[in-house]
Image: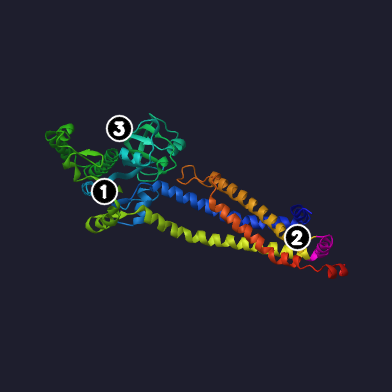
């Protein structure tokens, strides 16, 4: 007798029981696999965005907020830091490279990041069309920005003050798209990159505009004084180009920015992205920054690990629920096999009388449970990957930093399938032993 065919026949003869067992077993496995696939891909996305970044230095505040704002761009800045202090820090021998970030403006909910070309190098992204910015008021946009806004090289747009739509528009400070970055699967896909100087200019114009409005409101009835002030202003007016004309030996370059030392006093940036020069940087630099400066350091590795610890509590609860479902499925298989054995005790006795050994009957029950477990495992695996694809297509926005792939298969998935397979076999042990101990004479006598 063929053991596999015999076991399959008994399974087919009980379609409802088989279907419910496979369904229950598959659902338990699917829940675990979905959580595994989603959490792994989320973790990979967060790790990819923080790759190559050892430290973020910003204004005093929450380290987690600093990381969320300046790496993942999903939170708000803790404040600004003085450019002069940032430059001084960047000269520290423990620092290999530091990249400035200037935040505060946006366009249609996409954040504008003032930085240097080193930021694009950090994420290893290059323009798919056009080029990186070279002059002030030039910008390059990420792949998702181009996809959702429809902007292309040569288009102009007006920035908005603030990091969400609805802010005051800088109508007098438009930007020109000079490049569209290739898709990288990182946060850069959702950013608009420009020079730090461009962000400064937009904010200076915004501040000047507010000051001008306040001035007009306070002096509406003082036209004579205003004319007098205009006259005084003209007498003392200097060519603005003359104010910024400095000889080359007066100009200084640091952080990828070229400036005159006198310009440092009023300039601020949001943060510095830091790479260590060596292992000692991780030991000494964070404490030195936190204790000896007005700035706050935050470690991406530490803060993302803390974030996953917070998220992990909920994931563990759902995982525990899924394992409970698998346990219940195993119990269901056990009850189903045990009850079916009572119904076919006579059949087993006939098989023994026809020459089947006790070992054959034992394996017959085990194989039956293995087939049900295998079907449940395959169903759960397919269901999990289909669910991940549905989540990505219908529940995750196109501009999201985390994209889910239904075609990703992990080694741990097959480990979980093997464990669930073992649960199915374990559930069949007691019914199999009962079949092994079938008494031919008593059973046939009762029949």
x then y, percent, for residue 196: 28, 40
Which residue is at the front of the view, 358 or 50?
A: 358
- For the record, the magenta segment spans 342-355
Which residue is at the front of the view, 67 or 74?
A: 67
- Residue at position x 37%, y 48% in the image: 71
What is the C-alpha distance between the residues marked 2 and 1?
Answer: 71 Å
**Residue assigned mark 2:** 360
**Residue assigned mark 1:** 95
Which of the image's four quarters has the C terminus? bottom right
Q: Circle 2 sits in a helix, a strand or a loop, which is it?
A: helix
Q: Main secondary structure of the magenta part?
A: helix
Q: Is residue 273 left or right of residue 31?
A: left
Quarter residue 231 falls in: top left
Does residue 18 lie above or below 122 as drawn?
A: below
x then y, percent, for residue 283: 28, 57
What is the C-alpha distance between the residues marked 3 and 2?
Answer: 79 Å
**Residue assigned mark 3:** 134
């Amino acid at each position: 007798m063929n053991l596999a065919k015999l076991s399959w026949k008994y399974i087919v003869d009980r379609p409802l029981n088989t279907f419910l067992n496979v369904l229950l077993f598959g659902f338990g496995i699917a829940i675990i696999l979905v959580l595994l696939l989603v959490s792994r891909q989320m973790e990979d996305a967060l790790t990819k965005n923080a790759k190559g970044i050892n430290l973020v230095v910003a204004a005093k505040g929450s380290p987690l907020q600093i990381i969320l704002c300046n790496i993942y761009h999903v939170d708000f800045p803790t404040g600004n830091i003085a450019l002069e202090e940032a430059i001084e820090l960047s000269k520290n021998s423990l620092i290999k490279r530091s990249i400035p970030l200037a935040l505060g403006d946006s366009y249609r909910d996409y954040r504008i990041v003032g930085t240097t070309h080193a930021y694009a190098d950090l994420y290893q992204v290059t323009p798919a069309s056009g080029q990186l910015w070279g002059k002030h008021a030039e910008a390059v946009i990420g792949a998702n920005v181009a996809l959702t806004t429809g902007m292309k090289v040569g288009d102009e747009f007006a920035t908005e003050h603030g990091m969400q739509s609805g802010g005051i528009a800088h109508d007098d400070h438009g930007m020109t798209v000079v490049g569209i970055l290739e898709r990288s699967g990182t946060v850069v896909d959702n950013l608009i990159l420009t020079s730090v100087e461009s962000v400064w200019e937009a904010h200076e114009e915004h501040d000047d505009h507010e000051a001008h409005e306040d001035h007009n409101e306070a002096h509406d009835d003082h036209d004579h004084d205003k004319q007098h002030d205009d006259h005084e202003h003209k007498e003392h007016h200097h060519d603005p180009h003359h104010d910024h004309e400095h000889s080359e030996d007066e100009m200084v370059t640091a952080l990828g920015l070229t400036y005159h030392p006198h310009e440092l006093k009023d300039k601020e940036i949001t943060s510095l992205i830091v790479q260590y020069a060596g292992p000692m940087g991780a030991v000494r630099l964070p404490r030195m920054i936190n204790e000896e400066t007005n700035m706050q350091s935050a470690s991406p590795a530490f803060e993302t690990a803390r974030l996953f610890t917070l998220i992990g509590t909920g994931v563990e609860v759902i995982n525990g629920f899924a394992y409970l479902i698998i346990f219940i499925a195993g119990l269901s298989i056990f009850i189903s096999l045990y009850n079916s054995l009572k119904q076919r005790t006579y059949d087993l006795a006939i098989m023994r009388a026809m020459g089947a050994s006790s070992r054959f009957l034992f394996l017959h029950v085990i194989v039956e449970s293995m087939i049900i477990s295998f079907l449940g495992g395959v169903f759960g695996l397919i269901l999990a990957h289909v669910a991940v694809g549905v989540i990505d297509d219908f529940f995750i926005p196109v501009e999201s930093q985390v994209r889910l792939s239904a075609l990703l298969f992990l080694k741990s998935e097959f480990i979980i399938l093997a464990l669930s397979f073992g649960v199915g076999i374990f559930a069949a042990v007691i019914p199999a032993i009962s079949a092994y101990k079938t008494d031919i004479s008593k059973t046939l006598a009762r029949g």
